[in-house]
Amino acid sequence: MKESDNFFERVYKVARLIPLGKVTSYGAIATYLGAARSARMVGWAMNKAHNLEDIPAHRVVNRKGLLTGKHHFDGTNLMQQLLENEGIVVIENQIQDLEKVFWNPSEEL
């Protein structure tokens, strides 16, 4: 097993805990895992996870609330649709009221 595989599994463990109707960022997960400079690596993990049913990859966005990973989902707007189905408002690929729906694993876990 490569070191990145172990890191990806740790990312997935955190991602599975993101509550319905909440989002977090790549950086928030990285910081929680003690790898604050590894937000991009968290993004790579999410890219691999978008088809895994038990990982809500759609709930992980960039620090500004942009749906930067949306092109990894099937269909043009699937990521946005999944978020909207959970009550999150998205306008032009941007989550509205980010501070209200943001889940920070460092504070919550």
Image (tube, helix red, strand yellow):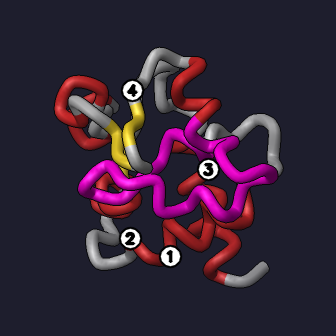
> Which amino acid does the dot numbered 4 rest on?
Val
Within-10-Å neighbours for mark 3: few <14, some 14–19, many 20+: many
Residue 5 is left or right of residue 93, and the answer is right
Disc 1 marks which residue?
41
Disc 2 marks which residue?
39
> Which amino acid does the dot numbered 2 rest on?
Ala
- Name which quarter of the figure residue 81 lies in: top right
Q: Nearer the viewer, residue 97 or 35?
A: 97
Disc 3 marks which residue?
12
Query: Residue 70 lies in magenta, yes or no?
Result: yes
| Image location (x, y in percent) of residue 70 | 59, 56
Disc 4 marks which residue?
89
Give the magenta-colored segment's residue range: 57-80
Q: Gap in Å between the C-alphas at discs 4 and 3? A: 24 Å
Q: Nearer the viewer, residue 50 or 82?
A: 82
Return the disc, 3 or 1, that comes first in the chain's sequence. Answer: 3
Residue at the (65%, 58%) spot, across then down: 9
